[in-house]
Image (tube, grey):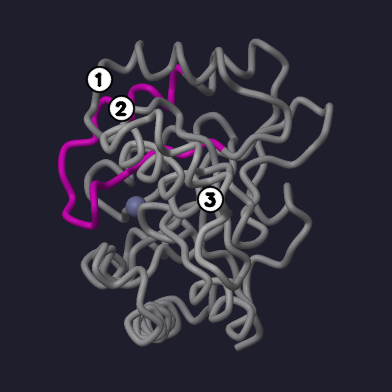
Amino acid sequence: MPGGPPAAAQQRRIPWGRAGGTIGLLAASYWIFMSPYSQLLGPFPYRRRTSEPVVALTFDDGPNEPYTSQIADLLAKAGVRATFFAVGACVERHPETARRILQDGHVLGSHGYSHDVRRCTGRAALSDEFRRAEDVFTRHLGLRPALFRPPWLLRTPALFDLARRHALHLVSGEFAHPLEVFQPSPERIARRTVAKARPGGLIIFHDGFDARGGDRSSTVAAVDLVIAGLSARGYRFTTVDRLLGVDPYRAA
Ligand SMILES: [Zn+2]
């Protein structure tokens, strides 16, 4: 676009002052690049439009023991299938847990190799993350996930372009509780999750923290409460691929 920023944008900035402008810019950047909802850069489903009472429980940043196995035990007891967006480095640490997840009938999506925020934006780093994660999934599990949730939900035009080339479906979701990563009480997490659940929703929990492990006992207990609470409201549980109507894995 010739002639710099449009006059209207410049005029709008004047009454805000410098601080207001900066905050506005940060808010806009967050919305475009990190919000679970923005579709500005490309399709990033956080929900399927449906009136059916069905949701997909998803777990990011694992496997992380003993919490991932505890969640798998709960899901097995309840007969619920879920989707785990696993980190390549964590699968290397706990390949047996990843295999158990698959044996239990859950779906494994990719959450990159390192979960390092510095490797989420540049094309070369992203490409390397894709390649290394795929290598781990292929070597340890014999499959190539087609579902990819970007770490921090951070996305750039390069991510969308690479995802297209690698035949990956980028997947968003809605946070179970905005502070769930910091482990508030299970009741707090569950109350909010159940209250906010909508038909067709993809709900994000964390069975690990930033690929570093960490105590997830609040999440484990919350998942039990959420399954009970949503079941009482008539909800069913499904996996992300079924909810979105896509294949979970690519051809070997
Ligand atoms: Zn993550």
Left of 34 or right of it: where is 115? left
First-in-chain label (1 vs 2): 2
Report the amino acid beneath label 1. Answer: Pro
Cα–Cα gap, marks 1 and 3 = 23 Å
Pointer 3 and pointer 2: residues touching (CB < 8 Å)? no
Q: Which residue is mark 1?
A: 184
User: Which mark sits nearer the N-terminus, 3 or 2?
Assistant: 3
Work out whether mark 1 precedes mark 3 in sequence or the reverse, and give the earlier one: 3
Q: Amino acid at mark 3?
A: Thr
Q: Which residue is mark 2?
A: 179
Q: Which residues are magenta?
A: 203-225
**Where on the picture, by quarter, is residue 90?**
bottom left
Q: Residue at x 57, y 18 (%)?
A: 196
**Closest to the observer: 185 or 238?**
185
Comparing labels 1 and 3, the label whose residue is closer to the camera: 1
Confirm whether the magenta stretch covers residue 211: yes
Q: Is 172 covered by the magenta stretch? A: no
For mark 2, give the secondary structure. loop
Residue carrying label 3? 83
From the viewer's side, name the closer residue of 231 and 181: 181
Q: How many marks?
A: 3
Of badges 1 and 2, nearer the viewer stands: 2
In percent of the image, x 55 and y 53: which residue is there? Answer: 106
Task: Provide the secondary structure element on which disc 3 rests.
Answer: strand
> Where does the image place residue 160, in percent across and percent down from the top left?
57, 72
Callouts 1 and 2 close, C-beta under 8 Å: yes
Identify the residue shown where x is 68% and y is 12%: 233
